[in-house]
Image: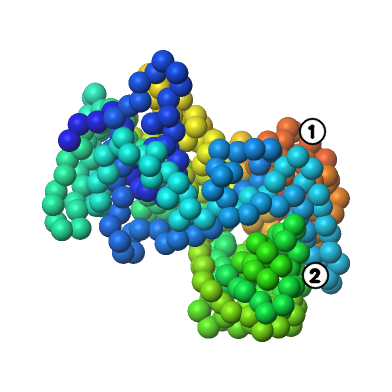
Amino acid sequence: MQCDVVVIGAGAAGLSLAWRLLSPPPGVSAPAVVLIDAPPGPLRPPPRTWCYWEQGTGAYDAWLTASWHRVRVRAPGGRPLPRDLGGMRYKMLSSDSFVRALGPRLAALRRVEGVADEITDRHDGVTVACRGADGTEHRIRARWAFDSRPPDPAPPARVGLVQHFKGWFVRTERPVFTPDSVDLMDFRTPQPPQGLSFGYVLPTSPCEALVEYTEFSGDPLSDDAYDDALRHYTGSLLGLGDFEVRAVERGRIAMTDARHARRAGRSTFRIGAAGGAVRPSTGYAFAAIQRQTRAAASLVHAGREPLPPRAYPRRSLTMDAILLRGIDTGRLSGPDFFTRLFDEVPTERLLRFLDGGTGPLEELRIGLRTPVLSMLRTTAEMPFLTRRT
């Protein structure tokens, strides 16, 4: 099977790249694309919700589940910190809606359901050996390959936590939610011995919302423990009353200072989480995936080597490593840290900072609103920590 580009993985990164490759600028021919999608089972990502903030109108607005112009953080003591996003919007997109919407737009590509077993770089491109669910073997020759699968083993890191969560899509018997505002972090939840926890509420109507319990810690919880935490949050803290759980969402996101290589071979590149699109301090990735795939597709259209750009500046990743180490050692209180940032830093600047879009002077001003001594102590020890897989 011959093509110009083979994309491995049909999650957010793979689908976004395939769509952009097949949407070239005027006067440019679309490349021939093969998309390798894992068969149903443990290798295929489960349905999930992606959230991101964006200025004005975006490419996926027609398919959003909801969007909001206000967000809120609740301090550990319960004090609400509401913020208006101005011209920005916090947006919620379900993976199912994304797949359905892009389906007709991806009609020009060839789709192979299978598992990529081997990627061989050649002097003039790449060959991907793929095995289908029925055992059928495919060999795909392409000029370029983009791999969105998690690298195995994971790249070594000095510090690492896991963001793990479970959420309920609930429908209440009475109107209890404020549809125009999201609770980004509600720190009234009981805090674990290591790391931090918070509630997360995405209302879609006065009676409907996605309510999640999230932890940043070393290890995920049992399913029963998540349910206990959600019952406490929805009952004792939110006071929802009677409600129906209409769907469930769960996930785990690595939060490490690992260095993700953007290139896996002469003609093979990594995108998405595999290419470092996850922001280590927050777990957000969707906006960075769009930046990566937009740039990579533009390079393919221009006939140039399509090395994806770095998802975040090195300064941002260094600050994230210090933050994660501080939380992991207990020197920093995660709830106090994030509450203080949200309380003292202008919202637009803070969101640009979390997206890696601020300059050194802005970051210095933000850094002065953190526990400086604890951060300096953690900074001093980072060069002496060993990176481990």
Q: Which of these two is toward me, 300 or 192?
A: 300
Q: Which residue sits at x=26%, y=39%?
A: 110
Cβ atoms under marks 2 and 1 closer than 8 Å: no
Amino acid type assigned to the residue bearing label 1 in the image: Leu
Is 373 situated above or below 241?
A: above
Is 61 situated above or below 82?
A: above
Return the x and y of residue 363 as percentages of the image width and height.
Answer: 76, 39
* Quadrant placement of the N terminus: top left
Return the x and y of residue 100 as percentages of the image width and height.
Answer: 42, 50
Q: Residues within 10 Å of mark 1 (few under 14, many from 20)?
A: few
* Quadrant placement of the C terminus: bottom left
Instruction: Give the CA separation, mark 2 to mark 1.
Output: 30 Å
- Considering only order in the chain, which callout, 1 or 2, is on the residue closer to the N terminus? 2
Res 322 seen here: no
Return the x and y of residue 356 as percentages of the image width and height.
Answer: 65, 39
Q: Which residue sits at x=62%, y=74%?
A: 171
Q: Check the image and name the residue furthest to the left.
A: 136
Label 1 sits on residue? 361
Residue 137 placement, left or right of 264:
left
Q: Which residue sits at x=39%, y=25%?
A: 300
Label 2 sits on residue? 76
Q: Secondary structure at mark 2?
A: loop
Q: Which residue sits at x=52%, y=67%?
A: 249
Is 20 situated above or below 99?
A: above
Return the x and y of residue 77 as percentages of the image width and height.
Answer: 84, 72
- In the picture, residue 349 is in which quadrant? top right
- In the picture, residue 266 is in which quadrant? top left
Q: Residues within 10 Å of mark 2 (few under 14, many from 20)?
A: some
